[in-house]
């Protein structure tokens, strides 16, 4: 069974759930297409790293939202991140051989999230993002950075069984 990032529910506003997350370590690839990014990261966790050790797969897989060019770009597009298991510390993380992979630790933070099912099409994700941002604005909650997509299931999982979320860091 795949490990999922643990979080603590910290409130909500309508369909928006607020969550506190501990620090996490991400392996991130930027700059190629989504499919290639996935395979670069998959090879890394299956042993194509400096220690040759396998790293257990976790969920979700995180991708930044593609924001229209009229919006200031804060996060990178064409990126994908795998969350490393919670038991890992930076000193334990196998060094990547592929120079396109960067390892970074994200400090504890609070997110606002809307969960949905389906294949996470660009249209669906954009609609969820807009609902999330609108609700946060109505609730006078400060958004930090840009929204991102979190996908929890393997690509072969039927759409109706998939768990997806659009989240964004907040300050309350």
Image: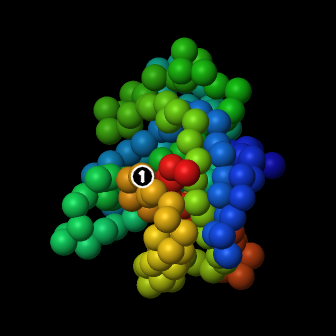
Whether residue 83 is visible to the viewer of this picture, yes or no, is yes
Q: x and y percent of residue 109 in the render?
A: 56, 42
Q: x and y percent of residue 73 in the render?
A: 25, 58
* For residue 147, above or below residue 106: below
* For residue 25, above or below residue 121: above
Q: Residue at x 52, y 33 (%)?
A: 107
The residue positioned farthest toward the left in the image shown: 70
Q: Please identify the quarter of the rendering in which residue 18 is found.
A: bottom right
Q: Please identify the quarter of the rendering in which residue 33 is found.
A: bottom left
Q: Residue at x 63, y 80 (%)?
A: 118
Q: Nearer the viewer, residue 10 or 88?
A: 10
The residue positioned farthest toward the top in the image shown: 91
* For residue 51, above or below residue 8: above
State left or right for residue 100 relative to residue 50: left
Give the crowd class for mark 1: few <14, some 14-19, many >=20 residues within 10 Å.
few
Q: Residue at x 54, y 15 (%)?
A: 91
Whether residue 46 is visible to the viewer of this picture, yes or no, is no
* For residue 162, above or below residue 2: below
Q: Please identify the quarter of the rendering in which residue 21 is found.
A: top right
State left or right for residue 56 relative to residue 93: right
Q: Nearer the viewer, residue 171 or 3?
A: 171
Where disc 1 sits, the SS reads strand
Q: x and y percent of residue 142 in the render?
A: 45, 57
Q: Nearer the viewer, residue 47 or 120?
A: 120
Q: Which residue is mark 1?
A: 144
């Amino acid at each position: 069974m795949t490990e999922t990032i643990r979080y603590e529910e910290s409130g909500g506003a309508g369909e928006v759930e607020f969550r506190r997350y501990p620090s996490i370590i991400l392996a991130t690839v930027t700059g190629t297409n989504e499919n290639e990014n996935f395979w670069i990261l998959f090879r890394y966790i299956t042993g194509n790293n400096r220690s040759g050790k396998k790293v257990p797969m976790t969920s979700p897989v995180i991708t930044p939202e593609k924001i229209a060019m009229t919006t200031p770009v804060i996060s990178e597009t064409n990126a994908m991140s795998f969350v490393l298991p919670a038991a890992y510390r930076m000193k334990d993380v196998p060094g990547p051989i592929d120079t396109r992979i960067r390892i970074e630790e994200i400090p504890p933070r609070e997110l606002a999230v809307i969960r949905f099912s389906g294949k996470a099409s660009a249209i669906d994700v954009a609609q969820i993002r807009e609902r999330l941002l609108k609700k946060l604005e109505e609730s006078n909650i400060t958004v930090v950075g840009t929204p991102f997509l979190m996908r929890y299931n393997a690509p072969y999982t039927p759409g109706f069984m998939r768990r997806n979320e659009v989240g964004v860091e907040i300050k309350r």
